[in-house]
């Protein structure tokens, strides 16, 4: 199940072109003023961790600081459900990827 979940998440986030349209609506990015706390930074963190297997404390903090409000997903021209990918990735992390 874990490998299937990893592939599912990676397939969806790989559609990101890093256009940044998602960022202007992200409440945590506005407060933290660091890209790792915005949707684009979270997508990048997910891709790096799933592809390379590395771990970053700051990246994980970015994932778990997401409010799951879904504002970013409404702005994504690629149709990525960023909120759902973050929710799934949290589950993946907690399973001990």
Image: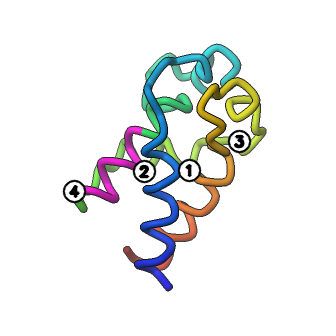
Whether residue 48 appears in magenta in the rendering, the answer is yes
Locate residue 13 relative to residue 75 in the image: left or right: left
Residue plotted at (36% across, 48% down) = 47
Residue 67: assigned label:
3
Magenta part, dominant SS: helix
Q: Do the CB atoms of the residues marked 1 and 2 lie less than 8 Å apart? A: yes
Earlier residue among tags 4 and 1? 4
Q: Do the CB atoms of the residues marked 2 and 3 lie less than 8 Å apart? A: no
Q: Which residue is mark 4?
A: 52
- How far apart marks 4 and 2 lie (CA) works out to 14 Å
- How far apart marks 4 and 1 lie (CA) works out to 20 Å
- How far apart marks 4 and 3 lie (CA) works out to 26 Å
Q: Can you give x and y, in whole percent of width and height, for residue 71 in the image?
A: 76, 30
Which secondary structure lies at badge 3?
A: loop
Nearer to us in this view, 48 or 68: 48
Residue plotted at (50% across, 85% down) = 1
Whether residue 66 appears in magenta in the rendering, the answer is no
Q: Quadrant of residue 66?
A: top right
Q: Which residue is mark 1?
A: 64
Range covered by the magenta-colored residues: 44-51
- How far apart marks 1 and 3 lie (CA) works out to 8 Å
Q: Which residue is mark 2?
A: 60
Q: Can you give x and y, in whole percent of width and height, for residue 53 in the image?
A: 24, 62
Residue plotted at (54% across, 22% down) = 32
């Amino acid at each position: 199940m874990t490998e299937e979940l990893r592939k599912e998440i990676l397939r969806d986030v790989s559609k990101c072109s890093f256009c940044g349209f998602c960022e202007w609506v992200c409440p945590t990015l506005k407060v933290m003023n660091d890209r790792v706390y915005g949707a684009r930074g979270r997508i990048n963190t997910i891709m790096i961790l799933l592809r390379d297997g590395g771990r970053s404390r700051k990246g994980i903090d970015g994932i778990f600081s997401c409010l799951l409000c879904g504002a970013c997903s409404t702005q994504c021209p690629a149709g990525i459900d960023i909120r759902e990918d973050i929710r799934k990735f949290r589950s993946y992390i907690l399973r001990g990827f």
